[in-house]
Image (spheres, rainbow, N blue to C red):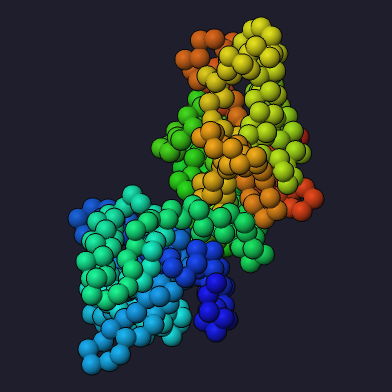
């Protein structure tokens, strides 16, 4: 437990402070936490890629600048020459104010802003990190930290320094690293009302973008024209950025799962698959729709589309607390495998076809994923067995209220899919919605986007 006075002060500043307090409450006062901002990445020469803050850093602080390290340390101290050590529960290392650089790169919050606006107990220049991090880690037995980045070496050096000085300070030093998936990601997985408000806004903007793309997607246009309408709609409504690179695949391009060139001329008779979602307030949407460029599904296209839609609707109907994403995937596989048998793509008995994964060449991905600040959001998909057995095997995680998932079955028949009837080759269909798990069932956050055959064809004939 955190001391009550510190906990109440921490919780009264902002939603970000409440999240920090909840994290520290989960790990206890003998555990520190270190979170590192996304590094700036060079695009070419002296031009950088657009900066997007690390989701964990933003979730805990709302701070949107590079060269930042956040340290949460219930027993942490900072020492200034000639002064007694001071407690520092929440410390930020940031870029100092620099009027000359701000002319080029924009305003910086600086040290004062980190404390006055973002609630840090103490803030220091990023350049002082090596000096001060060991004293903030001293007095703790563990550190919450995500491995796998360029900062690993600096953290290990700070822990080593804290251990070397432990003998003369009388303070413990960390001996364990705790993966955020055990604590912070459990919090991020369950969305609060303000988070859901941001996600609903992202979904509403994305809905308008998809409908506009359907309306202009006539033969003769290029895929990038549809992408341009999508991106324009995102920005016009205040979305900071796409949640991921938009996929606009026409014809056989729709059979490429991560197609990104978006440069083909759309032809009469093509299906167009658009997988695009915006980010709003650092929260993502993720939607796929597939539609006929000329406004009418051909018979083969319709048969594939209706099979995928049947699978998606069946999965959505299942969503409620206690159901698992494994259950949803099994349902999608069953419906799609039955469709492949009807379409003459595979042969044999349904159960045998499922067991032998005969569907895999045409449905090779899972049916959904977590959605939140990241489009493939954090959170464990598998959890220990209910009986507590320790045989090393986990079970699919039951869904709970507040979780948001995607449901996105598909069928893909590439040009070279020799086992598929010739009429199906070059057809790719995926349908994806964002689903909130509620107390008694679910809410489809993207239900407004046309999806039935009739609604899709009507949207494709609508004047933009």
Query: Which of the 4 image quadrants contains residue 163?
Result: bottom left
The quadrant in which the N terminus is found is bottom right
| Left or right, 156 with reference to 464 | left
Residue 17 or 25: which is nearer the viewer? 25
Q: Can I make out residue 201 in this image?
A: no
Residue 423 position within the rendered picture, expressed as x and y whole percent measured from the top left: 60, 14
Q: Residue furthest left?
A: 45
Name the residue located 22 percent from the left edge and 89 percent from the top edge: 81
Residue 211 position within the rendered picture, expressed as x and y whole percent measured from the top left: 64, 47
Q: Quick check: 79 above or below 319?
A: below
Q: Quick check: 371 above or below 145?
A: above
Residue 74 or 119: which is nearer the viewer? 74
Name the residue located 34 percent from the left edge and 58 percent from the top edge: 175
| Left or right, 223 with reference to 292 | left
Residue 60 or 136: which is nearer the viewer? 136
Name the residue located 66 percent from the left edge and 6 percent from the top edge: 348
Q: Quick check: 159 above or below 368?
A: below
Q: Residue furthest right?
A: 440
Residue 6 or 449: which is nearer the viewer? 6
| Left or right, 276 with reference to 118 | right
Q: Can I make out residue 349 in this image?
A: yes
Residue 180 position within the rendered picture, expressed as x and y whole percent measured from the top left: 46, 55
Q: Quick check: 29 above or below 421?
A: below
Name the residue located 32 percent from the left edge and 66 percent from the top edge: 173
| Left or right, 258 with reference to 86 | right
Q: Total of numbered circles in the picture?
A: 0
Residue 293 position within the rendered picture, expressed as x and y whole percent measured from the top left: 60, 33
Q: Residue furthest top?
A: 348
Q: Residue furthest bottom?
A: 82
């Amino acid at each position: 437990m955190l001391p009550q006075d510190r906990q109440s002060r921490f919780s009264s500043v902002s939603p970000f402070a409440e999240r920090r307090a909840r994290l520290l409450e989960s790990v206890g006062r003998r555990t520190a936490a270190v979170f590192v901002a996304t590094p700036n990445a060079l695009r070419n020469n002296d031009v950088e890629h657009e900066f997007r803050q690390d989701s964990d850093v933003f979730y805990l602080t709302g701070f949107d600048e590079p060269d930042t390290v956040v340290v949460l340390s219930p027993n942490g101290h900072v020492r200034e020459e000639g002064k007694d050590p001071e407690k520092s529960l929440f410390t930020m290392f940031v870029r100092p104010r620099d009027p000359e650089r701000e002319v080029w790169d924009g305003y910086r919050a600086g040290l004062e802003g980190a404390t006055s606006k973002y609630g840090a107990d103490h803030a220091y220049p990023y350049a002082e990190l090596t000096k001060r991090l060991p004293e903030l880690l001293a007095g703790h037995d563990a550190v919450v930290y995500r491995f796998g980045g360029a900062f690993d070496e600096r953290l290990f050096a700070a822990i080593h320094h804290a251990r070397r000085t432990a003998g003369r300070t009388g303070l413990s030093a960390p001996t364990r690293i705790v993966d955020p998936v055990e604590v912070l990601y459990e919090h991020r997985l369950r969305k609060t009302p303000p988070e859901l408000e941001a996600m609903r806004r992202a979904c509403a903007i994305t809905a308008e973008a998809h409908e506009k793309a359907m309306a202009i997607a006539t033969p003769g246009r290029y895929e990038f024209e549809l992408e341009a309408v999508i991106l324009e709609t995102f920005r016009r409504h205040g979305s900071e950025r796409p949640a991921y690179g938009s996929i606009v695949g026409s014809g056989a391009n729709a059979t490429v799962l991560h197609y990104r060139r978006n440069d083909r001329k759309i032809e009469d008779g093509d299906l167009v698959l658009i997988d695009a979602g915006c980010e709003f307030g650092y929260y993502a949407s993720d939607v796929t729709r597939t539609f006929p460029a000329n406004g009418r599904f051909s018979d083969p296209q319709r048969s594939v589309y209706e099979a995928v839609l049947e699978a998606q609707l069946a999965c959505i109907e299942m969503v409620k607390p206690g159901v698992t994403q494994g259950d949803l995937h099994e349902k999608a596989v069953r419906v799609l495998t039955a469709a492949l048998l009807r379409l003459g793509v595979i042969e044999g008995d349904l159960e045998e076809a499922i067991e032998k994964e005969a569907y895999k060449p045409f449905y090779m991905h899972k049916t959904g994923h977590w959605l939140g600040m990241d489009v493939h959001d954090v959170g464990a998909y598998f959890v220990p067995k209910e009986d507590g057995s320790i045989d090393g095997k986990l079970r699919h995680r039951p869904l709970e209220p507040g979780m948001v998932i995607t449901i996105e079955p598909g069928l893909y028949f590439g040009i070279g899919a020799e086992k598929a009837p010739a009429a199906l080759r070059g057809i790719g269909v995926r349908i994806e919605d964002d689903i909130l798990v509620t107390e008694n069932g679910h809410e489809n956050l993207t239900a407004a986007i046309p999806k039935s055959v009739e609604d899709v064809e009507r949207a494709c004939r609508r004047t933009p």
